[in-house]
Image (spheres, helix red, strand yellow):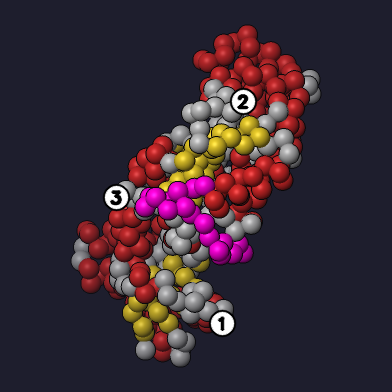
Amino acid sequence: MIKEINVQELKNLDHPILVDVRSEGEFAEATLPGAINLPLFDNVERAQVGTTYTQTTPTLARELGLRIISPKLPQLVKKVEELSKSGPLVLFCWRGGMRSKSLATVVELMGIPIYRLVGGYKAYRSEVVDYFQPKLPVQVVVLRGNTGVGKTDLLGQLRAEGYPAIDLEKLANNRGSVFGAIGLGNPPSQKKFEGLLYEELALLSDFPYVIVECESKRIGKVTLPVNFYAAMQEGIQVLHCDSMENRVLRLLKEYTTVPNALHEIGVALERLIKTLGHVKVQELRSLLETGCLDVFTERLLVEYYDKLYAYPNEPSSEYEFYLNYQEPMKALRKLEYYLDNKVVQPNGESAVFGVRYSAK
């Protein structure tokens, strides 16, 4: 028997295996986080069935769909059977319609237990959109500081030790700067990014706050949801600083390990001409091409990034907390103490926790 399950009930399944039976194109645009793609139709076949549906009749479209799917069924069922050994299997398509129903029916006939998501991806997407409409239900702690001070490193350390840290740049697959996409591959779609952020917030929902790095509204090609960005502006602001020497070393370590990074940095320099002018950009290019990477990096920080973001490099009354990262472990413990004892919940109570998130 096929078990119909809605989005809320899906959350109660223990490690479900999500199978998206839509086309590769639909899957690439957005899907449920963690889903596996087993398309009944490829992109071309889906277009053919859709054209037949709109230009002739639904009956002919179904007949065409059946002819396309029939030869694929043995292999699809075999893959589904293998996947079912790892956990409860949940099939879905766009609206929980014919595609997921047809495969679920065949899978059930083969004696494989199966769930089918009512409403499909569309129902999940509606829940994500609804979540990002009202005021965000958690407080946001924002790490602010100039480029290279180690904000991303600190977020990773916090997450590893059980604190509710979210790496927005990792979700967006972009470092949030003119060189932000170097070595990171394709960015997610807006829908996919929002789904990933929604899942992170759901995973950390037992906490009254989350910790993020400061970002503009746009990170690369994606945009932060309006209510999340508003919560960042209204949240607790932590000023994060480090020495110029450490910042340069950190950035060199990050970028020089990326294949072909120097060439991509050289290309990206063109985008700074409007801000720095042709002469300075040419000087930077010369430093890059002659291998003077430490001087190149420091000049880029001083002449571009520090002027762009203009964060102070010393304690400031504009921020609730100051963190000097020259001794990373000492700074980490100092921030953890602050989070455990000083962060205030919306109801005015101190946010002290006996149990932290268990990172996996």
Tell me the kind of residue under disc 1.
Lys
Q: Residue at x 55, y 53 (%)?
A: 340
Give how far across and how far down residue 82 sits, in percent. Answer: 56, 80
Marks 2 and 1, how far apart at CA = 54 Å
Q: Is residue 267 left or right of residue 106?
A: right
Q: Which mark is residue 76?
A: none
Q: Residue at x 45, y 76 (%)?
A: 13
Q: Earlier in the sequence, mark 3 or mark 1?
A: 1
SS at circle 3: loop
Q: Which mark is residue 85?
A: 1
Give how far across and how far down residue 168 sits, in percent. Answer: 51, 45
Residue 210 seen from this side: yes
Q: Earlier in the sequence, mark 2 or mark 1?
A: 1
Residue annotated with mark 3? 134
SS at circle 1: loop
Residue annotated with mark 2? 313
Q: Are marks 2 and 3 in contact (CB under 8 Å)?
A: no
Mark 1, Cα crowd under 10 Å, few <14 / some 14-19 / many 20+, is few
Residue situated in front as seen by the camera: 56 or 234: 234
Mark 3, Cα crowd under 10 Å, few <14 / some 14-19 / many 20+, is few
Q: Are marks 3 and 1 in contact (CB under 8 Å)?
A: no
Q: Is residue 344 magenta?
A: yes
Give how far across and how far down residue 220 sits, in percent. Answer: 49, 37
Q: Earlier in the sequence, mark 2 or mark 3?
A: 3
Tell me the kind of residue under disc 2.
Asn
Image quadrant holding the C terminus, namely bottom right
Give, as a single range, the part of the protein colored magenta: 342-360
